[in-house]
Amino acid sequence: MEIRIRGVSKYYFSQGKTIKALDGVDLTIPANQIFTLLGPSGCGKTTLLRCIVGLEAPDTGEISIGDEVVWSKEKNISIPPEKRGLGMVFQTYAIWPHMNVFDNVAYPLQVRNLPKDIIRDKVEKTLRFVRLEGFEKRPATKLSGGQQQRVALARALVAEPKVILFDEPLSNLDAKLREETRKELKAFLGKLQITAVYVTHDRIEALALSDTIAIMRAGQIVEVGSPQKIYFDADHEFVADFIGRANLVKATVRAQDADYTVVDCGMGTIACQRRDFAIGSEVTLCLRPEFIRLVRGEGAAGKNVVNGRIESLVFVGEAYEAEIRVGNELLLAKFDSDVNLSAGDAVSFTLDPAHCLLVSI
Ligand code: ATP
């Protein structure tokens, strides 16, 4: 089901101060996608999720799930959380330690007073789906972190919601398990016709899991797009910087031609992916470290060749991370681990215009 959020604001009052947790949010979350709210701590992700669920009442605006308005300030509509047809998975799993796996998963059906045999069928089907068949009698506390997370997922799915919401569900798992569980979760969700809204401040998780990412800052949505669009083609400096490591170089638009936007910056004149900026505009040139390509052997001539000097070099296993000094700019670059370089070496590198992204400041 599609979720529509229109003009939603939410204020908190604390110690005599007003905190604008959400500031006029307009957002459409498409049906049957994994949609991630990503942003720095305190930007309002959890508040927005809690407004969708119905655990918080917005101060303005309207929220619809499918055809139903679940919250409207103007129309005085407020559907309680249990009537919104949603499933939710929290960071802390919120599974009950005194219950076994079966009872934890059965709980949402038991409170609806469904007949026992129907509950058994649905719980068993859901446990099979999350690959926990055979664990029915196991106390919930005697499971690994990843298994507990799957119990939480099964409990959220058992009542067959049309929308499932996740609030940082993997953040209590160690790095390796987190990666495995992320893959598993994507596979589980891919098999269901379900809208998933996912909150995280982990950019890798967002990139790996999502169909669409919305980047938030200070209670507002800054940009919405596919992981590739957000990583390679962001419109805003904040987004380009937040989603991955980036060199941000101040630049001035010098010329527009059919294929490129040409800028002047501390590295000289650089041809960039074409963007509609007026000549003379102050912009930011965003360069990902992995797209700084060393020119080996004899120096090269041509478009976007830059000369610099290695200021530092750190071996990180699969690559070297280098800082390259070019005039006043210090650029972070990522090179294959077989390069033969040392601090102090003069280097030339090229920048593919397709990966020279101009963003507004
Ligand atoms: P995090 O990634 O750290 O969980 P978040 O993006 O989910 O952050 P929210 O928890 O939605 O952010 O908080 C948004 C803003 O509202 C923050 O400034 C936060 O301090 C404030 N806030 C949240 N809940 C309350 C509350 N109950 N009372 C007062 N202020 C609150």
Image (cartoon, rainbow, N blue to C red):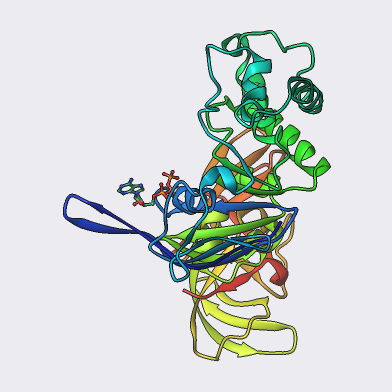
Q: Considering only vertical position in the picture, is 354 above or below 231?
A: below
Residue 284 visible, this orientation: yes
- Residue at (74% x, 20% y) in the render: 116
Residue 18: quarter of image: bottom left
Classify residue 350 as left or right of residue 63: right
Classify residue 224 as left or right of residue 16: right
Which x, y percent locates residue 52? 53, 53
Residue 332 visible, this orientation: no
Relative depth, front residue between 220 and 293: 220
Residue 65: quarter of image: bottom right
Q: How many marks?
A: 0
Which x, y percent locates residue 282? 47, 81
- Residue at (70% x, 75% y) in the render: 303
Which x, y percent locates residue 189? 75, 41
- Residue at (46% x, 46% y) in the render: 55
Q: Quadrant of the N terminus?
A: bottom right
Relative depth, front residue between 161 and 253: 161
Which x, y percent locates residue 172? 53, 27
Relative depth, front residue between 40 and 246: 40
Residue 190: quarter of image: top right
